Image (tube, helix red, strand yellow):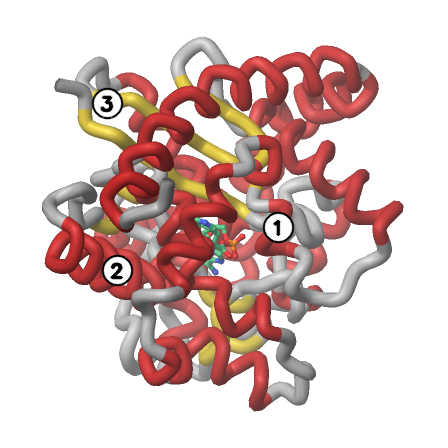
Amino acid sequence: MAKIVTSGIQPSGKMHLGNYLGMLQQAVQLQDNPNYRRFYFIVDLHSLTGRYSPKEKAKEIYELAADLLAGGIDPKKSTLFIQSHVREHTELAWIFNTITSMGQLERMVEYKEKVSQGIAANVGLFDYPVLMAADILIYKGELVPVGDDQRQHLEVTRDIARTFNGRFGKTFPEPKAILTHAPRVMSLNNARQKMSKSLPQGCLFLTDAPKVMREKIMRAETDSYTEIGYDPVRRGAISNLVMIYAELSGLTTSQVVKMFKGVGYAEFKKELAELIIRTFKPFQERRAKLVKNRSQVMKVLEKGAKSAAPIAHVTMEEVRRKVGLI
Ligand code: TYM
């Protein structure tokens, strides 16, 4: 039987290098494994837990679909759709709400970080990991390509699966995260924080113009050593740049360090910027075409939802029966 791979991404802001190296690149590579069946979704409902304008949201959802397709998600190999188009995700989340403790969600680092930044939390933000568990388990997902920041949420998914199975009989697998070599890309101007759209200066967006990419890399934080090196604990900033170079070139971090032995930071950064620009040029061209071709993108998403929905429906029927709903 095919193993089920599931992953989601929020349509809030543009796709960045962290999303690409932590998740998308791997989601694309997994498409070549004939033993897997893949469900990739745009988690529009999750993204409503932040502040947004409805008009802007609709555009973000559609443009994220263009990002994913331009980035290599192939609708012939993966089922790509919008989370809210398969209603069972939220129905299952409600059942899971009733078996999840407040205490566990109160311990979520992502939630605590947002609250500590002064974001007024709504119930949806608090409940976010439960909907994520439903996204995965509605397809009985076993493997989840995600970045390191989602590991704790996946722990909740496993706990929910275990609790449900314990109370109502074996129903769900306990899914595992699959991480890349770059599970936590750090901000370019603050290596103590992960790259994120909420810190735009240190965030390299895949749609940035070459000039902007160059500027962001040339301005990136380094350290006062004279040579590049890879030591994420003591030299976070330069190690982050080395890791990005390694991931995009297919080399290992030690090969990159060797290759740039005796080369100054400015020269290394110049090479890195050119590598990034080269890598994402075809992506940017494909994306520009897709953004103009709205009907083609919408067709892919509709087809995806149509093929995901019957599977979600079967799981939901099983759950309804097991918990005693009639
Ligand atoms: P989101 O939209 O914040 O991020 C999408 C994916 O990108 C990864 N990522 C990173 N990886 C490495 N370095 C970074 N700096 C970085 N920033 C983001 C994230 O880990 C993620 O894999 N809760 C999820 C979305 C979600 C989901 C799901 C994921 C909803 N349901 C079910 C998997 C399965 C999120 O907010 O991702």
- Residue 124 badge: none
The count of marks equals 3
**Front disc: 3 or 1:** 1
Q: Estimate the x, y position of residue 49 in percent, counting from the top left.
A: 65, 64
Which residue was labeled with disc 3? 36
Quarter of the image holding residue 63? top right
Residue where numbered disc 2 is placed: 160
Q: How many residues crowd mark 2 within 10 Å: few (<14), some (14–19), many (20+)?
A: many
Residue at horizontal 31 percent and vertical 50 percent from the top: 256
Q: Is residue 269 above or below residue 1?
A: below
Q: Are marks 3 and 1 in contact (CB under 8 Å)?
A: no
Residue appearing at x 32%, y 78% in the figure: 104
Q: CA distance from mark 3 to mark 1?
A: 26 Å
Residue 27: horizontal and vertical position, in percent? 38, 33
Q: Can residue 100 be seen in the rendering of this structure?
A: yes
Front residue of 161/16: it is 161
Q: Earlier in the sequence, mark 2 or mark 3?
A: 3
Q: Are marks 2 and 3 in contact (CB under 8 Å)?
A: no
Amino acid type at mark 3: Tyr
Q: Which residue is mark 1?
A: 45
Asked whether 156 or 322 is in front, the reply is 322
Report the side of 79 relative to 30 (left or right): right
Numbered disc in front, either 2 or 1: 2
Q: Position of residue 207 (x, y in %)?
A: 70, 40
Question: Element type at marker 2?
Answer: helix
Along the horizontal axis of the image, is 191 left or right of 14? left
Q: Mark 2 is on which residue type?
A: Ile
Q: The N terminus is located in which quarter?
A: top left
Give the mark nearest the N terminus, 3 or 1. 3
